[in-house]
Image (cartoon, rainbow, N blue to C red):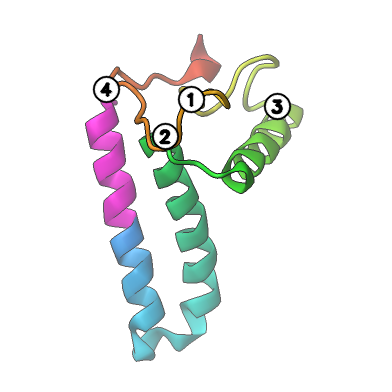
Amino acid sequence: MERTAFKGFIEDQIKIAAKQITDTKMANTHHFAHGKLSFLLSLHRMVDGTATREDRGLHDAINDVLQLLGLVKEKTTYFPKYPSSKQPSGQPLTDRSIENPAQS
């Protein structure tokens, strides 16, 4: 999946989750939508290269759990590329193809 398509998917999912939060007919799903929105916003920042330390910690923890469950190989990541901690904030990831590293 191309980075642009991946980012578009994330943005569409953010809009859906945000709408669920504001929809009074779906009040019982607010907490669910909030959790989903929180993750998606973090993922969006990772793709944009504007991730906070909290974002990186969240995705590192998710990766650790996926490795423990055997869904991601050791020494690989489910996320295609983390911006370097030395990379200036706001510098986006390159527009390269996003492949599933667990299948390599």
Residue lying farthest to the top in this orientation: 104
Circle 2 sits in a helix, a strand or a loop, which is it?
A: loop
Q: Which residue is mark 3?
A: 67
Disc on res. 49: 2
Marks 2, 4: nearer the viewer = 2
Q: Which residue is mark 1?
A: 87
In the image, what residue type sits under mark 1? Gln
Tell me the distance, in whole angstroms, between the alpha carbons under discs 1 and 2: 8 Å
Tell me the distance, in whole angstroms, between the alpha carbons under discs 4 and 3: 26 Å
Q: Which residue is mark 4?
A: 95
Q: Say which residue appears at 70% left-offset and 39% top-offset.
A: 61
In the image, what residue type sits under mark 3? Gln
Q: Earlier in the sequence, mark 4 or mark 1?
A: 1
Q: Which residues are magenta?
A: 1-13
Q: Are marks 1 and 2 in contact (CB under 8 Å)?
A: yes
Image position, residue 82 (x, y; %): 51, 26
Image position, residue 45 (x, y; %): 43, 44
Tell me the distance, in whole angstroms, between the alpha carbons under discs 1 and 3: 26 Å
In the image, what residue type sits under mark 4? Asp
Circle 4 sits in a helix, a strand or a loop, which is it?
A: loop
Q: Main secondary structure of the magenta part?
A: helix
